[in-house]
Amino acid sequence: MKLDILAFGAHPDDVELGCAATIAKEISLGKKVGIIDLTRGELGTRGTAEIRDAEANKAAEILNISVRENLNFRDGFFKNNEKHQLEVIRMIRKYQPEIVLCNAIDDRHIDHSKGSKLVSDACFLSGLLKIETSCDGKIQQPWRPKLVYHYIQWKNIEPDFVVDVTGFMDIKIQAILAYDSQFYNPNTNEPETPITSKNFLDSVKYRAQDFGRLIGTEYAEGFTVERYLAVNSLGDLI
């Protein structure tokens, strides 16, 4: 299956928190979108890997994405090396996306920046003819995505561009709340973490509101780029 957009996250819920509204908007425009989770989030303070699996599947249904896979890398301990790069390359060549979305280039959680660089490097390597990979017993053809964008996570990184996601924040919040084990729940006795407060959950919305305010819309999501953005004319900008 060829996808238009393939979003990678170091953990299940990274993509939802970072760019779910953008994904929902692209799907509404007829684009085929998939998500690849690098780990099962098994080191998370709350919940279990099995719970996260179920939550990820529920979020995928809410977003109506075409496919979701998990590479089952070790949470906290995966590396940006040949072994892990080849697994990511297999996914890129399998789905042949035009656009790849990946973790923030710098963030509080060490897996986010590691995952960001791993996926970015794999996107380049995936286009090299002499790197051989196979999937389902068949040799894969080289494929390099046209664009690689990084969504914004915990840190307030200055975006290189923002996407107007007015009308799609509700589905983003629904997808986030599918991860019931991870976020604000006043009725739980589970340990508190930096992402379990009501303030954190509210921050997802007010960051989008602030980005939207700055471009004259209700909500927006921000991204950083690896090369100059290009437009055909000044009229392409909103």
Image: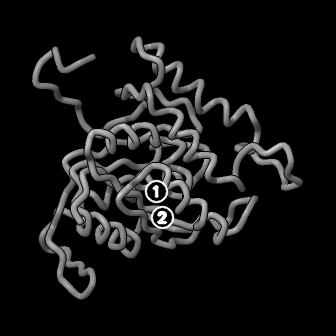
Q: Which mark is residue 170?
A: none
Q: Which residue is mark 2?
A: 38
The kind of secondary structure element at disc 2 is strand
Q: Residues within 10 Å of mark 1 (few under 14, many from 20)?
A: many
| Residue at screen point 43% across, 67% down | 69
Residue 76 visible, this orientation: no
| Residue at screen point 48% across, 66% down | 79
Q: Quadrant of residue 123?
A: bottom left
Q: Position of residue 171 (x, y in %)?
A: 51, 40
Marks 1, 2: nearer the viewer? 2
The type of residue carrying mark 1 is Gly
Apparent side of residue 100 relative to residue 108 in the rendered image (left or right): left
Q: Residue furthest bottom?
A: 137
For the C terminus, which image quadrant? Answer: top left
Q: Position of residue 204 (x, y in %)?
A: 59, 33
Q: Position of residue 160 (x, y in %)?
A: 36, 28
Apparent side of residue 206 relative to residue 151 in the rendered image (left or right): right
Q: Position of residue 109 (x, y in %)?
A: 60, 50
Residue 89 visible, this orientation: yes
Q: Are marks 1 and 2 in contact (CB under 8 Å)?
A: yes
| Residue at screen point 75% across, 43% down | 184
Label located before the other in sequence (1 or 2): 2
Q: Residues within 10 Å of mark 2 (few under 14, many from 20)?
A: many
The kind of secondary structure element at disc 1 is helix
Q: Which mark is residue 115?
A: 1
